[in-house]
Amino acid sequence: MKSHARSFFFIATAVILLFSAMILHAEENRLQFNSAKHFKIVQFTDTHFYKGGPRSQEVLDNIKSVMDAEKPDLVILTGDIVTGKPTLKSWEILTDLLIAYQVPYAITFGNHEDEAETSREELLKYLSARPYCLLSDDGGTTVLGVGNYVLPLYNQEGTAEKLIYCMDSRSYSLAKDQGVDGWGWFDHSQIRWFAESNQAWLRRIDGKILYKVELPRKK
């Protein structure tokens, strides 16, 4: 009987600790306007960073210079950030630099993100567990792409005043057999997710739909 009680205590303690960690994670990553109603975003894109790359140290130096000068509230990495091997180690080096600033950062994947050795799904799992990283997959498996998510931006009263949508434009054309070459694009499932998610947030914020978005018809 004591053994069962001890096991239950350990399980309950683990649940409490996990719940506390989730609260702390949410608090450290909360996006909020300051008292002057300002919120600064810094964007980095197409860095093509990887450990040992000929210009990789330059990438890190440039990121550090911008972070020191701008002191942003949010960093957004918009694709083709790490494009070589070793992929996860390279992501670790780059995100360690951002983590040192204790500033939340969001990520969207580019055309070349999963070409080296790590899939988009593996990148999502690894990066979303990193400190201060906001990457998630709100759309889930019913929405094409990996990493479709929304970031609420709160005012000083704790109300979500703005929404930042991060969406995966995917890699390359899926219609090459139809003569459409080039890069990927947003799918109807992503457009539908955006519209439905936006309406849900509007209801949550003001208790009503402020405007209606016409959803694409299902074929």
Image (cartoon, rainbow, N blue to C red):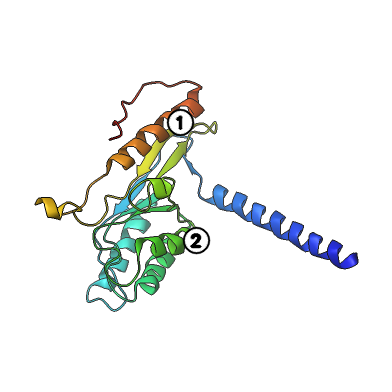
Question: From this viewpoint, is residue 100 visible?
Answer: no
66 vs 52, nearest the viewer: 52
Residue at (29% x, 79% y) in the render: 52
Q: Give residue 195's position: percent from left, percent from top.
A: 36, 33
What separation in Å lies between label 2 and label 1 (alpha carbons)? 26 Å
Three-letter amino acid code at disc 2? Answer: Ala
Q: Give residue 101's position: percent from left, percent from top.
A: 45, 59
Using the image, tell me which numbered label, if any, was put on residue 200. 1
Query: What residue did someone put label 2 on?
Result: 129
119 vs 62, nearest the viewer: 119
Residue at (66% x, 53% y) in the render: 20
Where 207 sits versus 143, above or below? above
- 102 to the left or right of 167: right
Where 66 sits versus 94, above or below? above
Residue sticking out furthest to the front: 219
Mark 2 or mark 1, which has the lower sequence index?
A: 2
Where 101 sits versus 166, above or below? below
- 174 to the left or right of 203: left
Q: Residues within 10 Å of mark 2 (few under 14, many from 20)?
A: few
Question: From this viewpoint, is residue 138 visible?
Answer: yes
Q: Residues within 10 Å of mark 1 (few under 14, many from 20)?
A: some
Q: Quadrant of the N terminus?
A: bottom right
Residue sticking out furthest to the right: 1
**Circle 2 or circle 1, nearest the eye:** 1
Q: Give residue 140's position: percent from left, percent from top.
A: 43, 48
Residue at (65% x, 52% y) in the render: 19
Using the image, tell me which numbered label, if any, was put on residue 94. none
